[in-house]
Image: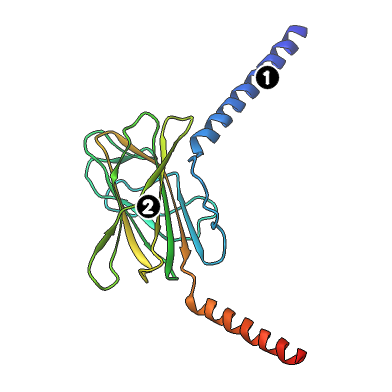
Amino acid sequence: MIWNLKYMKIKSVSVLVVLATLSNFAAQADSSYFVAPSFRGLVGTEYSGWENFTNALNAPNYPHLPGSTGDAFITQTTPGAFVTPNIYSFSSTNTFVLTDATPFTLGAVNFQVRNGAGTVPFDYSSVRLEYDNGSGLQSLFTTRTEWNNTSGGIASQWRWDVSSLAINNYKIYFNASDLSLSLDAAALDTQVVPEPATGALLGFGLMLFGERVWRRRA
């Protein structure tokens, strides 16, 4: 009986250790290692986050992470991929497009993406933002920043200042660098462009206030 109690205690401890290990692994697997921009969550912003995908070819993958407020979607456009729930292909080079439209005129677009551990990286030179503000399709390239994570994948970030373009819809294209890429996670943050009228009204209000103060003193 004593031996049984000891065995049960050891077994219980072992189960707890296994559960704790699995929980820790799951937390690491779910972590994208992305950096939240300073404007996330403010008025006039949208956030979309992905860590699981449901469609491998020519069908939208909508954001599902908690806090997502945007309706952007990611589509993989090359045959041969499948869902793991990452989007993976060992027989073709994946090509992706993120499509987004916002209810406000855009000021900033911040895009982050991560490949799965042990898979090839993205073709960073392929990442571009495409828009049409009435002058035909235009492409914008920008500087990429990168940081590694403990799981082996690479998280990368691109930020575009589009405040002078007067657009609210666009696409971001990004491709694999070779066969065997796994799209592990993605994040998109957008911010409204500051309205010039807001600054003008504020300046006018301050001018009137100053004038009234001067008259009272006079």
Q: Quickly name the residue at label 1.
A: 13
Asked where in the image residue 178 lies, by quadrant, the reply is top left
Q: Residues within 10 Å of mark 1 (few under 14, many from 20)?
A: few
- Residue 81's place in the image compared with 127, above or below, is above
Q: Specify the quadrant that holds the C terminus.
A: bottom right
Q: Residues at badges 1 and 2 in contact (C-beta under 8 Å)?
A: no
Task: State the residue in front, 144 or 204.
Answer: 204
Mark 1–mark 2 distance (CA, rounded to whole Å):
41 Å
x, y (%) of residue 144? 37, 45
Q: Residue at x 46, y 51 (%)?
A: 49
Q: Residue at x 35, y 69 (%)?
A: 165
Compared across the picture, whether 174 is left or right of 209 comes to: left
Number of on-image labels? 2
x, y (%) of residue 58? 27, 52
Task: State the residue in front, 216 or 198.
Answer: 216
Judge depth for marks 1 and 2 and give the one in front: 2
**Amino acid bearing label 2:** Asn
**Amino acid bearing label 1:** Val
Q: Quickly name the residue at label 2.
A: 61
Q: How is the image coloured?
A: rainbow
- Residue 165's place in the image compared with 175, above or below, is below
